[in-house]
Image: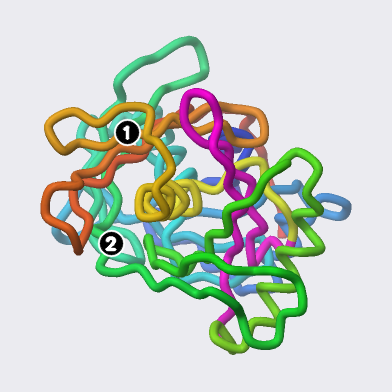
């Protein structure tokens, strides 16, 4: 079984071409493949499949084998993979519906992909959380995956894993499904974001849907965007290592529309796996 490893801002994925429908994996097999000690290692696994309506279908799984959600960095990586497989247009379906994308730059193994995300229907403010002892006021919103966004100071020193896990498992408002937890602070040119991801159960180097959620919540919270021209808001985002950007329309209130995530997607390796 052939997989291709890609990473989007340090969020890494194993991707396979399953347009012939020959690959069937159960959650344990996915978890074993993604295990960083006993498998190949990845934050997630994706299958590129045929779609009756669009250019392809993106099927995404977390590293623990759970699925049914969108992944923004994964979306950019599967677009880069589709291009490498000879697909020229990038209208595709994912767990949260229709997406489209553009490759706006290429340099060696890296592509810069601009990915249209789902409209964001609403945001909920939580001054406090039930079942959580740490100060945890913030916002909840669904950007294809459920996210909680908390604004902090001194982000570099934050214990992302401990506090993220406390909110993910302890906040009764989000049980039993749980929630991804994003920690955000204003930077000179935009925002910095770090994310604890459920399914991975750790901090990842970047989370695309989390970065989108963080930027929309940042605007709601009053954090200064990098630019705002003709009602199009843009935030430049510093993830753990790489830089991304989010832009969206602020003209019509809710839902937030024309949401785009832009960032790198890089081919890493081709891997043969025997199960």
The reply to whether residue 17 is visible in this rendering is no
Identity of the residue drawn at 64% across and 50% down = 152
Whether residue 76 is situated above or below residue 151 in the rendered picture: above
Which quadrant holds residue 185?
A: top right
- Where disc 1 sits, the SS reads strand
Whether residue 144 is situated above or below residue 80 in the rendered picture: below
Circle nearer the N terminus (2, 1): 2
Count residues near mark 2 (Cα–Cα under 10 Å), then give few for <14, some for 14-19, many for 20+: some
The reply to whether residue 7 is visible in this rendering is yes
Residue where numbered disc 1 is placed: 234
In this rendering, position of residue 27 left or right of residue 160: left
Which quadrant holds residue 226?
A: top left
Of 122 and 75, the residue lying toward us: 122
- Where disc 2 sits, the SS reads loop
Identity of the residue drawn at 40% across and 61% down = 21
Is 153 magenta? The answer is: no
Identity of the residue drawn at 88% across and 52% down = 37
Of 118 and 105, the residue lying toward us: 118
In the rendered image, residue 166, in percent from the top left (x then y), is placed at 75, 73
Q: Which mark is residue 61?
A: none
Q: CA distance from mark 2 to mark 1?
A: 16 Å
Residue where numbered disc 2 is placed: 120
Residue positioned most to the top: 107
Chain part drawn in magenta = 177-201
Determine the main secondary structure of the stretch shown in magenta: strand
In the rendered image, residue 248, in percent from the top left (x then y), is placed at 25, 43
In this rendering, position of residue 37 left or right of residue 14: right
In this rendering, position of residue 158 left or right of residue 66: right
Count residues near mark 1 (Cα–Cα under 10 Å), then give few for <14, some for 14-19, many for 20+: many
Identity of the residue drawn at 72% across and 52% down = 203
Are the residues flagged by discs 2 and 1 in contact, CB closer than 8 Å?
no
């Amino acid at each position: 079984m052939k997989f291709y490893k890609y990473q989007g801002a340090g969020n890494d994925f194993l991707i396979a071409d399953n347009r012939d429908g020959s690959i069937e994996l159960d959650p344990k097999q996915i978890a074993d493949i993604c295990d960083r000690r006993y498998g190949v290692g990845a934050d997630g696994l994706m299958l590129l499949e045929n779609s009756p309506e669009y250019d392809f279908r993106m099927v995404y799984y977390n590293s623990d084998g759970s699925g049914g959600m969108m992944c923004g960095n994964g979306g950019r990586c599967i677009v880069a993979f589709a291009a490498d497989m000879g697909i020229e247009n990038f209208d595709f379906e994912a767990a949260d519906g229709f997406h489209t994308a553009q490759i706006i730059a290429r340099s060696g193994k890296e592509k810069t992909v601009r990915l249209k995300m789902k409209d964001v229907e609403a945001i909920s403010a939580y001054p406090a959380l039930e079942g959580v002892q740490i100060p945890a006021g913030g916002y909840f919103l669904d950007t294809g995956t459920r996210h909680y966004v908390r604004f902090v100071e001194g982000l570099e020193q934050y214990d992302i894993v401990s506090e993220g896990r406390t909110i993910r498992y302890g906040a009764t408002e989000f049980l039993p499904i749980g929630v991804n937890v994003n920690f955000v602070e204003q930077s000179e040119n935009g925002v910095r974001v770090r994310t604890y991801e459920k399914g991975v159960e750790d901090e990842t180097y970047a989370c695309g849907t989390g970065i989108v959620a963080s930027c929309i919540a940042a605007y709601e919270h009053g954090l200064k965007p990098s630019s705002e021209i003709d009602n199009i808001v843009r935030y430049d985002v510093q993830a753990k290592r790489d830089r991304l950007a989010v832009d969206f329309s602020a003209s019509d209130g809710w839902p937030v529309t024309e949401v785009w995530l832009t960032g790198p997607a890089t081919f890493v390796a081709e891997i043969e796996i025997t199960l």
